[in-house]
Image (cartoon, rainbow, N blue to C red):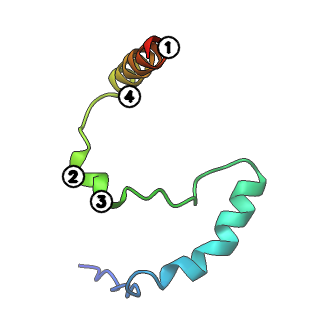
Amino acid sequence: MTEIPRIVVPDFPLPLGELAPLRAAAEQKGSRDFTPLWSGQAAALSREMPAAMLRQITVKETLERLHRLRCN
């Protein structure tokens, strides 16, 4: 049996310093592969769903809000 080497990863936020050059190079090429996406305190409010459903809900809620703004 082959033993898998243990990788030690530093605690957050230390790895972000190592990420900066990768992020800069990727973003120059138009890639967001190394761009951190923070959910913050709202993570608990997230709902799991297919992307198409998320898009439909987002469009519907946006149109509803725009309508309310126009009516006020």
Q: Rounded to the nearest whole Å, what is the CA distance between mark 2 and mark 3? A: 7 Å
- Whichever of callouts 3 and 4 sits on the residue coming sooner in the sequence is 3
Query: Residue 37: image x %, image y %?
Result: 47, 56
* 27 is higher (above) or lower (below) than 19: above
Write the residue at 58% across / 82% down: 17
Q: Secondary structure at mark 1?
A: helix
Q: What residue does disc 3 label?
A: 41
Q: Which label number is shown at residue 70?
A: 1
Label 1 CA crowd tier, 10 Å (few <14, some 14–19, many 20+): few
Q: Which label sits in the foreground, 3 or 4?
A: 3
- Amino acid at the residue labelled 1: Arg
Q: Is residue 29 above or below residue 71?
A: below
The disc, 2 or 1, on the residue closer to the chain's N-terminal end is 2
Identify which amino acid the numbered label 3 is placed on: Gln
**3D distance between C-alphas at marks 2 and 1:** 31 Å
Res 2 → quadrant? bottom left
Relative side of 11 to 2, left or right: right
Is residue 21 shown above or below 29? below
Q: Residue at x 37, y 21 (%)?
A: 61
Q: Secondary structure at mark 2?
A: helix
Q: Evaluate if marks 1 and 4 touch, with contact meaning CB atoms under 8 Å apart.
A: no
Gap in Å between the C-alphas at discs 1 and 3?
31 Å
On the image, numbered disc 2 is attached to which residue?
Answer: 44
